[in-house]
Image: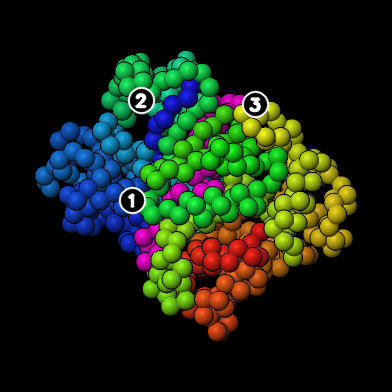
Amino acid sequence: MSSTNIDVGFPPAAPVSTCHSARVFEDFERCYRAVQSKDARFDGWFVTAVLTTKIYCRPSCPVRPPYKRNITFYPTAAAAQQAGFRACKRCRPDASPGSPEWNLRTDLVSRAMRLIGDGVVDREGVTGLATRLGYSTRQLERHLNEEVGAGPLAVARAQRAQTARVLIETTDLPFAQIAFGAGFASIRQFNDTVRAVFDGTPTAMRAQARKRNTVGSPGALTLRLPFRKPYAADVLFGRLVSVGVPGVEEFRDGAYRRTLRLPHGNCIAELSPTPDYISCRLMLDDVRDLTTAIARCRRLLDLDADPEAVDGALGRDAVLAELVAKHPGIRIRRTTDEHETAVRVVLGQQVSLAAARTHTGRLVAACGVPIDDPAGGLTHLFPSLDELAAFDVTTLKIPASRQRTLRNLISALADGSVVLDAGADWNRARAQLVALPGIGPWTAEMIAMRGLGDPDAFPSTDIGVMTAARLAGLSTDVATYAHDHWRPWRSYAVHYLWAANMKGET
């Protein structure tokens, strides 16, 4: 593989968040104004399709806007591709930030889009996706076509095309390896898709990349992960460093680094903030994991959020206004692995950040798989469920009650009585969690917020939240006030409070 830079946005462009309009692509005048002003805030919310050229673009495309009569709008890149349009070579609409819509809701379509983004269709097919969601394939197809403008296969195809472009332009891998690595069933399907979506052959695209010097020497794959501004990277990366588990995570030379366990192999991800994007350097065992690795890094850093909507709502609140003004663009510290987060939250019950890191580090050292890291100090993968199930938790120096809670959680995750993944139903997961002895509302809300990405989770009994709210001038019950004033962004409110007072966070 090769080391270079290319913009990458996953999942493919999708509808605008509910704070603007659930079907903004249907508001022609509003969309056209965004295109005329080249408003980058709308990138990822819809795509512009030009009827005369059969090209689709992001709203901020730098070319001269076409005449009204010559354009139409689609909710997703997949829908535009299905209608016979190909991606603009100038603005690369597939590299837009993902839609915030799928991270705001817990309905069937949103859960499906999160799982597709994680590569489930490529690994398990549409039947596997439908089974995970508890629906028939026919129902799933109908719902996605109604809202996304394309079925699950078309959405996955758009994602495969983007992965293929990245590998064509940034590596020296043989095209056959790229085809199967990107998730295509055959080389013919790969060639046909690349021609249809990018209006060029793989050979021609690689030749153009060489002219731009975007194919480098063998090594890691380096990508640019876009986001919507503002982005309070200093706050988020500072938090990642403060809670990093020794051996699994580290901060080195200005970059947050961590190990990832992926479907086909392991990975070391290195993430560095810049003013305009996150630099992402991936060292993959298997190129087939590229899509999933990117999706999980984006999820960890909450890169598809809509800060304008969040800050616009919370910034008008008397308690949070000053905090929002001080740190605009705060994101939720999320996860690359839902099971890992659940285990870490339980280990962090009623202890300090330092103690939580110590307990988790001991767990990792005792049963995590060792990994080589020639470029740094990472030593282990976080343990899998099988490895956790085989581990004697009584060897951990934590109270017996917490040992039982941890054992119960691991068993429930292993037998499926608690389901935590990218497509989990947030409220059902909460109910499953609190049914376990030793897991109460604080633990369930922390897992919902960090592990599942629920933007409206609220651990109301968290010491850091209560302390910061009091210091910010809140004199009433914080849970009641949050319910009345901070919905549907209570998770972001929590992170603004933590930014003012880091105590109590785990």
Disc sitting over residue 374 in the figure: 3
Judge from the rendering whether residue 494 lies leftward or rightward of residue 17; answer left or right. right
Please report the residue visible at 78 percent of the width from the left and 40 percent of the height from the top.
365
- Tell me the amino acid under the disc marked 3: Pro
Nearer the observer, disc 3 or disc 2? Answer: 3
Q: Quadrant of the C terminus?
A: bottom right
Please report the residue visible at 51 percent of the width from the left and 55 percent of the height from the top.
235
281 within the magenta span: no
Please state which of residues 198 and 276 is positioned toward the viewer in this rendering: 276
Magenta stretch: give its range: 284-312
Residue 441 lies, in percent from the top left, at 67, 69
The residue beneath circle 2 is 194
Which quadrant would residue 405 be assigned to in this image? bottom right
State how the image is colored. rainbow
Please report the residue visible at 58 percent of the width from the left and 26 percent of the height from the top.
286
Label 2 residue SS:
helix
Which of marks 1 and 2 precedes in the sequence? 1
Judge from the rendering whether residue 237 lies leftward or rightward of residue 165; answer left or right. right
Q: How many marks?
A: 3
